[in-house]
Image (spheres, grey):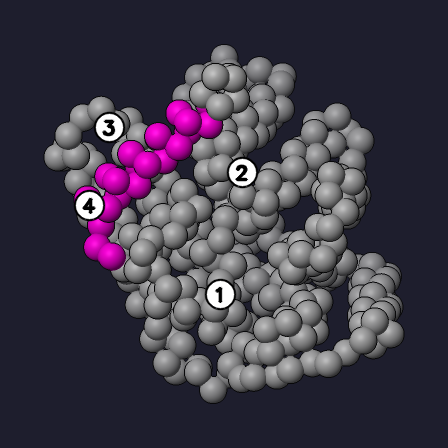
Amino acid sequence: MSPQTKLSRKRNSWVRQLTDRAEYHLSNQALALYLPLTLAKRSYDSRSTAKIFRETGMAHLLAISGLHIGLIYGIILGLVRWLGRLSNRFLEHPRFYGITHLISLTGIWLYLLLIGMPTPAFRAVCMLSLLVAGRLLGQVHHPLYALFATAFFFIFLNTAVIYEVSFQLSFIAVFSILWFLPLYPHPHENDVFWKRIFKYGLISFAITSAVMLGTWPVVASIFGRISLETFWLNLIMVPLLGLFVLPCCLLTLVVSALSLGNPPFGILENGVFSLTELVVEVWFAVLQNLHSWGDWASFPLTLDWGPPQFILYYAIILGFGKLLTDRFRKIS
């Protein structure tokens, strides 16, 4: 048996054990949210739950992709830096900044291996690695370079990836975000609390608008449905995901992993699973209530464009974005 096969079997065994422990502790609804957010797995009762996320345009919240990788990386980086500050010797090290990023990057790659390297997450981690390496080496100054390098790398590995909907949507979404990047407000450390919250709200709205501008033609032509709920749902659901849901899920995953080999009756493990169940169910209830109020904003729309129409549309969007960013730079 090759070392790669042994490693794959070991990983599958760990994932199966972690899944079994989650199934023991969590309700069906909580399990349908916990497994996709931590192990990139679906439970048997996840269809009805996933349906609401699809109808509201929030399906990306249940797929480990760029959003989750960015949030998880930020959580790991914040934790590593907090632990580093406990030691003055480490804190005063001239390479403290670089070391914390490298440790966090190692952690995100190990996590990627654990969940089986799903393609959207793999693409996001590759791009993140290029960005971090570029900043540490002082080479890459614009995220667009990392985006195109990542895209060309995956196209080189498999040319057919160009025709995959997930690749098209993820590339267009990230490109749209980066193309309008100079327009986003920049929070400052000396901003008062309410001003910082207001800026984060504007950033979330601007990012959602950029993504919608870039992806709606592809979504309409393939799925035949558009959801405008995305605007206000992103303002609420994404911060809740980053502040409460993902940290609780990751903490539970770590505690569960450390408890492997022991009966699932530990006080700590029971406690974190109970907390996570409460958090994810409240998060889902918020989505359900918002969707019941804003169901009118999700409607069918089928687009029958050919290549000339797509090229013309994206040329207009690129020109519009370039015009806005150039004027913004002159004003600022």
| Residue shown at 62% from the left, 57% from the top | 166
Q: Is residue 311 above or below residue 173?
A: below
Left/right of residue 168 with respect to residue 89 in the rendered view: right
Label located before the other in sequence (3 or 2): 2
| Circle 1 or circle 2, nearest the eye | 2
Q: In whole angstroms, how far apart are the C-alphas of marks 1 and 2?
A: 22 Å
Residue 123 shown in magenta: no
Residue 268 in percent (x, y) is at 18, 34
Q: In whole angstroms, how far apart are the C-alphas of marks 1 and 4?
A: 26 Å
Residue 197 in percent (x, y) is at 50, 60
Residue range highlighted in magenta? 7-28
Which mark is on residue 117? Answer: 2
Which mark is on residue 58? Answer: 1
Closest to the observer, 30 or 275: 30
Residue furthest toward the front?
Answer: 1
| Circle 4 or circle 2, nearest the eye | 2
| Residue shown at 44% from the left, 82% from the top | 294
